[in-house]
Image (cartoon, rainbow, N blue to C red):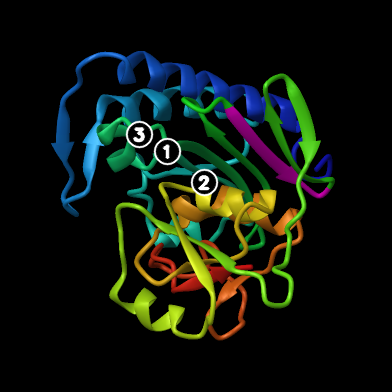
Amino acid sequence: MATLIDKPIADICNIARLAGEAILEIYQRDFEVQTKSDESPLTEADLAAHNVIVKGLQATTPDIPILSEEAADISWQERQTWQTFWLVDPLDGTKEFIKKNGEFTVNIALIHNNKPVLGVVYAPVLDKLYFADENGSFLTENGATRRLKVVAPAVGETVKIVGSRSHPSPDLAEYLTRFEHYEMVPVGSSLKFCMVAEGVAHIYPRLGPTMNWDTGAGHCVAEQAGATVCQLDGSALLYNHQESLLNPYFEVK
């Protein structure tokens, strides 16, 4: 990544951990829940993590612009000039945060030429740090770091399909008819990408709405572990290549 950012990925991992600490401080006490214009929930933890990440990235890479879910009102006229930018979801899985089930993450991705080239996903409650760049995909857990690699299902093996816990899709039932034997594994946030990267799930089909910031970091973690991340027609899943930041349906396998 030296050609794009003159900082080690460890610096970005540290920013994600600091954001996670800010989230946990709020997670462990009572907090208010607001509703945004798109009916999605917003908590003070989303904003606290956003502030930590933006401050950290601006100090680390002052010349690279930042697109965060909590500061996404940036015109297409400006965004289309970006070749490289940070794509951030300060708290992915706000519904899981509110339910207090631990399945939420901090997502930080570096996008270059519409593709994620660096990704950090941190799950604060689980204390699992996933990170990836051109050197591969890794997980730091319990003080140890290991390389991640996807695992394809063996012939006749039950296919483990990971899906959203809070956003079931009507189209998913039809998608599942193509599998003779499968097990559905529900989980929140970008952890779905990471489970495929770890080899504990085989496929993540997303047949429901997501935004660019929901997927950039997890996309990189899965792809660098050997997964294919693409639209249902096989074409690439791209970022900031059009005015809308809404992703098409996609699958990770």
Query: Which of these two is toward me, 146 or 58?
Result: 146
Question: What is the CA distance from the residue labelled 1 to the residue labelled 2?
Answer: 7 Å
* Lateral position of residue 165 relative to residue 18, left or right: left
Q: Mark 3 points at which residue?
A: 101
Query: Which of these two is toward me, 8 or 123?
Result: 123
Q: In this view, does 100 lie above or below 179?
A: above
Residue type marked 1: Glu
Element marked by disc 3: loop
Residue type marked 2: Leu
Residue shown at 31% from the left, 30% from the top: 100
Which one is earlier in the sequence, the residue at label 1 or at label 2? 1
Q: Name the residue under label 2.
A: 191
Q: Main secondary structure of the magenta part?
A: strand
Question: What is the CA distance from the residue labelled 2 to the residue labelled 3?
Answer: 13 Å
Residue type marked 3: Asn
Q: Mark 1 points at which residue?
A: 103
Question: What is the CA distance from the residue labelled 1 to the residue labelled 3?
Answer: 6 Å
Task: Find out whether the residues at labels 1 and 3 contact each other: C-beta distance under 8 Å.
Answer: yes
Element marked by disc 1: loop
* Lateral position of residue 132 relative to residue 73, left or right: right
Which one is earlier in the sequence, the residue at label 2 or at label 3? 3
- Residue 201, given in percent of the width and then of the height, sits at 60, 57
| Residue 95 seen in render | yes
| Residue 7 seen in render | no
Task: Find out whether the residues at labels 1 and 2 contact each other: C-beta distance under 8 Å.
Answer: yes
Q: Residues within 10 Å of mark 2 (few under 14, many from 20)?
A: many
Q: What stretch is highlighted in magenta?
A: 128-134
